[in-house]
Amino acid sequence: MSCREIKAAAVAWPRQWRLLETGAADGATNMAIDEAILIHHSRGEVPPTLRFYRWDPPTLSLGYFQNADREVDREACRRMGIGLVRRPTGGRAVLHDREVTYSVTISQKFLPGSVLETYRLLSQGLVAGLRLLEVEVDLFYPDKTQRELRSKQSAACFDTPSGYEVAVAGKKLVGSAQVRQRGTILQHGSILLSVDEEILFAILAFPSEAVRQRVKAAFGAKATALDRVLPQPPGYDQVCRAVARGFAAALGIDLIPSELTAGERLTARKLALEKYSYLNWHEQGRLEVISP
């Protein structure tokens, strides 16, 4: 199904979407805000939303299904001041530090396609925005061999591009993940301004030091960042503006700068405290608070 066919099959989405820039927050707060937007959009209380945000402290986020004990060196995270949080979305671990994080929240009635089809449509906004910054990006779709190899790579998200993600010369620049709840799509992802392999591979767990070094050495061939592809890399604000313009152009929408509603803020505070402060929130009855 093409993007045009997806739009034709959908209930027409509102022309006006909400644009949020919520600043820097810890991992639990950031994930709680994304889910709060999903909840209130599913109730029809807020329009489709494009959000930009940052992380303080730098945080390692895990995909919903990842095993923290097997894939993360939690002592190294504590020693280096790296936060930990589990996302509601799938995928692999992402170190959120020097990046622009985006999220898109929209009802499935507006985007009735499969996960891959909606990835492709929403990624067009990312591509359009990054091209405004003169980044030569394309949508990457791995061939069968690459998809089979992906399961054998490290726990790091940017280790291998997955379907319809944004890449430069085959190297992943934007890593995204998606979840569908309450008839609503939440897609969020990281646009790398810079990447520090030393920190990333210091906080991930490996069966041996030899494996760690081998995977780290290969990482540069699979991932990239804006400071590696542009002679004068843009800053956070410049990337946010360009990507917002890209979404507006690619999706034919007007983005209205706004703020979280009082209801969203209340929901987010509750979710941050009662859910995302626990790394194993996805395991009923086994909550373990994340150590500072």
Image (cartoon, rainbow, N blue to C red):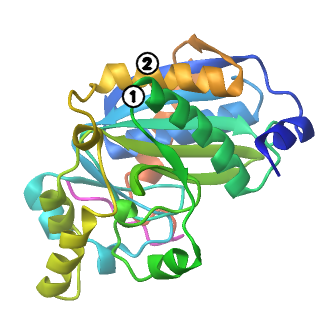
56 relative position to 79: left or right: right
Q: Is residue 150 above or below residue 59?
A: below
Q: Position of residue 170 (x, y in %)?
A: 42, 57
Q: Position of residue 171 (x, y in %)?
A: 38, 56
Q: Position of residue 107 (x, y in %)?
A: 76, 38
Which residue is depicted at the point 70% across and 31% down? 41
Which residue is depicted at the point 29% across and 59% down? 290
In this rendered view, identify the residue nearer to me: 207 or 221. Answer: 221
Q: Is residue 282 above or below residue 45?
A: below
185 relative position to 6: left or right: left
User: How far separated are the C-alphas under marks 1 and 2?
Assistant: 14 Å
The numbered mark at residue 134 is 1
The numbered mark at residue 80 is none
**Is disc 1 surrounded by few (<14), some (14 to 19) or many (20+) residues within 10 Å?**
few
Amino acid type shown at disc 2: Arg
Query: Residues in magenta?
Result: 283-292
Is residue 267 visible in the rendered image? The answer is no
Write down the residue under mark 2. Answer: 241
Amino acid type shown at disc 1: Glu
Q: Quadrant of residue 31?
A: top left
Which residue is depicted at the point 52% across and 22% down? 244
Q: Is residue 131 above or below residue 29?
A: above
Query: Is 115 included in the stretch rendered in magenta?
Result: no
Task: Look at the numbered disc 1 and give the secondary structure of its residue.
Answer: loop
**Is disc 2 surrounded by few (<14), some (14 to 19) or many (20+) residues within 10 Å?**
few
Is residue 141 visible in the rendered image? The answer is yes
Q: Nearer the viewer, mark 1 or mark 2?
A: 1
Task: Look at the numbered disc 2 and give the secondary structure of its residue.
Answer: helix
Query: Is 290 included in the stretch rendered in magenta?
Result: yes
In this rendered view, identify the residue nearer to me: 199 or 239. Answer: 239
Q: Is residue 68 above or below residue 18?
A: below
